[in-house]
Each structure stands twice: as structure tokens, then as C-alpha cells.
Amino acid sequence: MNPSIAEQVLAPTRLTIQKVLNAHRVALRPTEVGTVTSVARGVARVAGLPHVQSDELLQLPGGSSALAFNLDKESVGLVLLENDGRISAGDEVRRTGRLLDVPVGDNLLGRVIDPLGRPLDRHGVIPSRERRACERESPAIPDRLPVTVPMQTGIKVVDALVPIGRGQRELIVGDRQTGKTAVALDTILNQRDAGVVCIYCAIGQRNTAVTSVVSELTARGAMDYSVVVVAEGDSSPGLQFVAPFAATTIGEYFMEQGRDVLIVYDDLTAHARAYRELSLLLRRPPGREAFPGDIFYLHSRLLERSTHLCERLGGGSLTALAIAETNAQNLAAYIPTNLISITDGQIYLSPELFQKGMLPAVDVGRSVSRVGGKTQLPAYRAVAGDLRLSYSQFEELEAFSRFSRRLDDETRATLERGRRVREILKQRQYQTESVPEQIAALLAVTEGLLDAVDLSQIGCAETNIRAKVRTSLPDMCERITDGQQLSVSDRQELRIHIQNALAPNVVERDSHADP
């Protein structure tokens, strides 16, 4: 081809390329890069990040991430969020410019995720349009409303004697293997038709225990309205540390949409241990039991995010059930006493009651709800208003009666009534009861309708009462659930149906009577 012709053909192309090059502008962005100076289990120290923020997410080699924890003059202490053994001294660390956050939204319902929002249930990537910071300020006092709406657990001893309200912070405390998680799971299962979003946060639990919980929630249809956030026992301490904050952020999203949310922290004792481990490795000053001095502030700023919002902000609520573990029934240990002072009451589970088969093993004398009857439906206050006091008196009288062989008739009657109350308060796991069923059973025992029934038949009698109430009194059940008070005629009608349901059991009791 003639050179002049070639120049004519290539000229437009060269002109276009030149225009593109002239129009292109490279945006220069300063990037801070630090260098790892030392690495320990779950933590690392980095030099060369003078402008890093607290709780900022940092990028490590291999795609792993870390959290800026200690901001010292000469170095930055990092909390590693993944167990990555490939990190070593000399590696580069880059700032991301954003705080630690987690995805939020309705797409999380029914999913099992880790505290960073990554799926653990093999159901694919979770689509999410919004992410929120894990550390957020709690609502201001003017933005809160009093706690007045009950959070029904479906457990008689809790709903009647230790009531919980929506927006309350209640502590479930006790030794190992006393049924703490069982109480929380029953509460989640009881929210099936209540329109409550449930979040279960497992912190430092065994893999088998977490798998069992997820299996139960799935089998009983509770995953449709639940989110499970998991930081297992073999996860890094940093992941266990951020787990409850990430779960709370997810719950706050639904609360700000005007919905009611229940969140379970299982458990905050393991969370405190993970925080202690990180703090000691990063040379923070130790205090009582080697915990850092700000452990109280850590849990208080977490639990203060649970509240009942005012109508201006949607009127949603976030109810927290925090689980704590004691050793040898020592409620005066550091972490339990901290949590008791932060929360609005505690449900104490006694190992002695558990060993005796009193399930759930709730120690009524040591359990309390500081919100109290303000959250109870009127029917509870009418039927079981003085049940707590009378049951505590019965327990003391029963202990005293063991040292005496001769008892007067009044004492015998009080003991017999108390034993029937104790039998009525027994309840198997996963067998939650509706409000009208609980009211009928409590009315039967408090008014002496079960005095003629043998102790061994109390369970069968309660089953008959519940079935009778469901089938014969649907209108009354609806009124009780709607929060209406029991009228005199309602109580009389309820007594008649209870007596009809108890007829076979009374005959059984008479057949065992002494000649």
C-alpha cells in the first residue's frame, strides 16, 4: 500500500486515540499502607497507619480482614476476624476507610450467617442493598416509650411470675446444663403467630449445639421469621467479639421498620471471655478476674440498644434475652453481677430443681422482672396476682415441715396446694401454651379445683383443661388474648368447664383415697 494512502487511513484512528488519551484523567487517591510487626493468636500489631479510625475495617493479604482495636502512638492493635495462619510479620495492611458493618434486610430471614454477613447454610449468596455499622449509638431517652406490651414466652412460670415485655432486657442465668437455651428457644417458637422477628446469636458454642438449635428451629417452622448469627467456639476471638453487635444491628433494622424483634445472646459469658483474651493479648490493663476494666461498658452499650421506640420513629421494639453462665451457683461472680445490674431482671435456673425434674428449673425466689405486672395481661394479674408470694411461702414451709412429723390441718392443706402449684408450673420443652390455656390452668390450681386430684394425675388433668378451654370457650379465649379483664361471669363459666374437664381425674383421686 502506498504510504500516503496508509497515513490517510490511519489518521482518523490516531485522532480518536489521542482524544481519548487527552480526556482521560487519573484520579489519585492516597492509600495508607501499614506493616505487620507482630502476630499472636487472634491479634496483630501494625506500624504505619497514622490516620486509622477505631473499629475501622482493614484489609490483610489473602483477602482476610481485621478490626482496628488499639490506637497507640507507635502502632495499631488489630483484632483478626478470621483464623488465617498465613499472616506474618512484614505483610502489608491497607485501610478500607469504612467501619465494620453487616448486611441488613428481609433477605436475611431464614438464613444462618456469620457476624460478617457471610452465609453458613449453603443456600447461596444473600442479596442485600444496605449495610449498617455494627457499633451504633443506642436510642436517646426522648425516643423511647415505656415497656407495656407483653412478650409471651409460652412458659407458665415465666409469663405468670416473671413477665417479660417487648423492649425489655431480661437475663437468663444459671449453671451449665440447666436449660437456659431451652427457655430462649421456647420463647422463639412461641412467636410463630405474634409477628415478632427473632434473632438467635450463638457466641462460642459448640458446632453440635448450634446445629441442634438450627435443626429444631427449622423443623418447627421458626426459621421463617428468624435469623441465626453464629460465631462458633472454634472461630477467632475477634469474630466472637463482634457477633452480638452485628446481630443487634440486624435487629435494629427491623425495629426501625416498626416491627417487634426478639434477640437472644447465647451467651454473653463466652463473649466476655473472648473480649478478655483479646484485651490481654493487646496488653490492656487487667482488672477483676483479669477482665479489662471496660467490660461493664462493653455489655451496657450492647444491651442499651434494646428498647421500645416512640411512635415518631415507628413504634418498633427490640427485646433482649441475654444468657449468662454461672459456676457452682455463684451469682456474685463478676460477669453475672455486671449483667444483673444492666438488665431489667433475671430468670435464674437452679441446678437443684433441674436434678429433681422440675422443668423448667426456674427458681422463683431468685428470679425477678423489674418491669413487673405493667407488661402482663389483666387476666394474669387477676388469676396469679399473689401466686409468687404464696409459692415462695410454700417452699419455705415445705423445707421447715421436714423437721416436724405432726402438722395441723391448715398446714397440710397449704402444702398440698403448693405441691399442685409446682406440678402445674412444670412444662416440657417445645410445648408452649397459649395465654387462655395458661389462665385456665392457673385458675384451677389457685382456686383449689385441683385439690381433689392426685398429684400423679395433675399433668393429665391440665391436658384435659387445656383441650376443654380451646374447644368450648373460643370467645373467652379471644377476649383474654386481646387483653380484656375476666368478669365475674367469665370466671364462673371457666370454673364450670374446668370442673367438667376434671371429673375423670377426681374419680381417679377418690379411688386412691385411704379407706
Image (cartoon, helix red, strand yellow):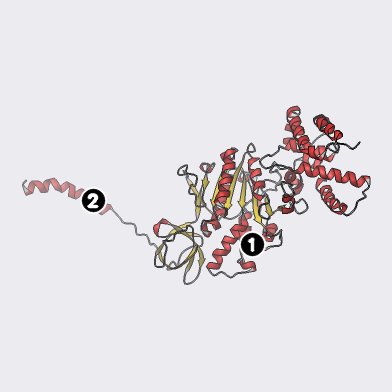
User: Could you tell whether 360 is left or right of 486 in the image?
Assistant: left
Q: CA distance from mark 1 to mark 2?
A: 63 Å
Q: Is residue 262 visible?
A: yes
Could you tell me the amino acid type at mark 2?
Answer: Lys
User: Could you tell whether 292 is left or right of 46 in the image?
Assistant: right
Q: Which mark is residue 19?
A: 2
Q: Quadrant of residue 196?
A: top right
Q: Residue furthest bottom?
A: 74
Q: Which quadrant is home to the C terminus?
A: top right
Which residue is pictured at 45% across the width and 65% down the height?
51
Q: Is residue 477 above or below residue 108?
A: above
Please provide percent x and percent y for residue 112. Answer: 52, 46
Could you tell me the amino acid type at mark 1?
Answer: Phe
Please provide percent x and percent y for residue 361. Answer: 72, 49
Binning the other alpha carbons within 10 Å of mark 1 as few (below 14), some (14 to 19) or many (20 upward) gives some
Which residue is pictured at 73% across the width and 38% down the height?
435
Q: Earlier in the sequence, mark 1 or mark 2?
A: 2
Total number of numbered discs in the rendering: 2
Q: Residue furthest top?
A: 472
User: Could you tell whether 514 is left or right of 167 in the image?
Assistant: right
Binning the other alpha carbons within 10 Å of mark 2 as few (below 14), some (14 to 19) or many (20 upward) gives few
User: Could you tell whether 34 is left or right of 457 in the image?
Assistant: left
The one of 415 and 487 positioned closer to us in this rendering: 415
Q: Is residue 252 visible?
A: no
Q: Which mark is residue 296?
A: 1
Q: Quadrant of residue 429?
A: top right
Q: Residue furthest left?
A: 2
Q: Which mark is residue 266?
A: none
Please provide percent x and percent y for residue 17. Answer: 21, 50
Which residue is pictured at 66% across the width and 43% down the height?
186
Judged from the image, the secondary structure of the residue bearing numbered disc 2 is helix
Judged from the image, the secondary structure of the residue bearing numbered disc 1 is helix
